[in-house]
Structures are given as structure tokens and as C-alpha cells.
Amino acid sequence: KGTKAKSAHDMVREYTVQKALKDAYPYVPKMVALCTDEDIIGADFYVMERMEGIIPRANLPKGVELDKLQTRALCTNVIDALVELHQVDYAEHPDLVELGRGEGYCERQVSGWNKRYVKAKTPNVPSYALVRQWLTTHTPSDSKTCVIHNDWRFDNVILNADNPTEVIGVLDWEMATLGDPLMDLGSALAYWIEADDNIIMQQSRRQPTHLKGMMTRDEVVDYYLKQTGLEVDNWTFYEVFGLFRLAGIVQQI
């Protein structure tokens, strides 16, 4: 129910992104085939290789127990995989270049989610008028342009079953695009629930970032900036945007 974004669940686009990324980013599953004949299953679909491993959700699967040091290694490896994605030279891949719309990604995102939230709003939720106004007023210029995943979470990575701290795959590329990496990080941290967050935050947890050994949100930001060499003096914007975007997604679907 409600208004679904026209570009949502675009299987042709997701197939194209992964096929173009595979050589430059080893965590992408191998694409096998694309079918645009809707007579087959009633929609476009693609087939990819099966990647066997562990997908961490709100809690690690039964039988997977990591100590504090192993948990820190898992955390670091997941962030490193995001850093690695943001270093991909997209200019060498025409299909990736076509994803971009030029400068102004941050501005387009704020404007777009502003409109989507208004469209999806029902009488039982806040208008977020002050939040939306604040985001519009404080929108920065793009820090840089790179390939971004746009839905980076622990339950979109696959871990090696024999070594659960090792990332072997990354899934769910339907929202991938060319954009600002700090927006990608901010959106990822909207899901990052810490052990000492309040009960309402804890109830929304869908990944095991509460475990001992996991970085805090602040530590993730510091680590990411150190690894990439990027600098930021307005992290609050990316944090607020990530949370507002997530509120918009929840309201939409």
C-alpha cells in the first residue's frame, strides 16, 4: 500500500550494477543471467551464483560464538569492505558511470526524501517539519563521488562459515549508485544500535552491533575517516539524514 518509488526493486538495474562491479569488487556475487520476459514469472528477474555462508541478523546464528577480539575483527572487516567499495574506480566501467547524475547528490537526497516522506505520511506520525527544514538548511556540498551501496547493513553481508569474521559477499545492490560516501556511512549508522542505547532503539535492532567488541557509532566514524583520509566537520548532518531516511523507509514500507 502507499506510493512506491518508481525506481524501487529494479532488477535490471541491480543486475547491471553487480555485473559491472564484479571485476573491481570481489564481494559481488557472480551474475548468471537476466530475464526481462514477464511471461516467465510476472516480473523481471535475474539469476546469480549461490554464495554459501553466514548472514548475521539481529543476533549471530546459533552455534556462532565470537569473543570480544573476534567481534572487533568482524566489525572492522565489515567497515573495511565498505571502505573498499568507496575506492572502486568507477570511471573504468561505463555501466557504473551511467549511474551518476553529477554534483549535488546530498542536495538531491535531502529533497527527494523530503518529498517521499510527505507523500507517505499518515495522520498517526509526526510531520518532521523541523527536521526536514534543518536538513535543507544544513545540506553540505558533496565530499566526493564514488560507488555507494546505499543499504549497508550486517544482514546484507555474507560471512565465511569456517571463519565468521571474514566477509565473503555483499548482497542487495538495488539502491547502489554514484554518490557521497559520507551519506552511505550515515545511512549505515542509522541501523547501528549500541549496547547502551535506550529501550526503543534496542527494539529496532536488526544487526549484532550490541555485542562486546563492536565499535560505537563514533568509533566507526573515526575509523572510516582515518582509513579514507576524508575530513568532516559536520557529522551531525549525515547522522540526522541517516535517521530521517530510515524513518521515511519505515513509513513507506
Image (cartoon, rainbow, N blue to C red):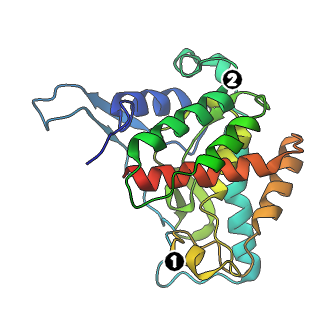
Give the camera-side residue of 245 and 171. 245
Dot 2 amino acid type: Gly
Q: Residue at x 70, y 59 (%)?
A: 77
Q: Residue at x 66, y 57 (%)?
A: 189
Residue occupied by mark 1: 203
- Residue at x 50% of width, y 57% of height: 126
Residue 97 position, x and y percent, is 59, 18
Residue 208's spot in the image, x, y percent? 59, 73
Between 234 and 129, the one lying in front of the other is: 129
From the viewer's perspective, is 228 left or right of 201? right
What residue sits 85% from the left and 48% below the top? 225
Circle on res. 44 = none
Q: Residue furthest left?
A: 39
Whether residue 65 is visible, yes or no, is yes
Q: Quadrant of residue 111?
A: top right
**Which image quarter: residue 10?**
top left
Q: Mark 2 sits on what residue?
A: 104
Image coordinates for residue 80, horizontal then vertical, percent: 73, 52
Q: Residues within 10 Å of mark 2 (few under 14, many from 20)?
A: some
Residue 130, position in %: x, y?
65, 49
Q: Is residue 237 above or below residue 179?
A: below
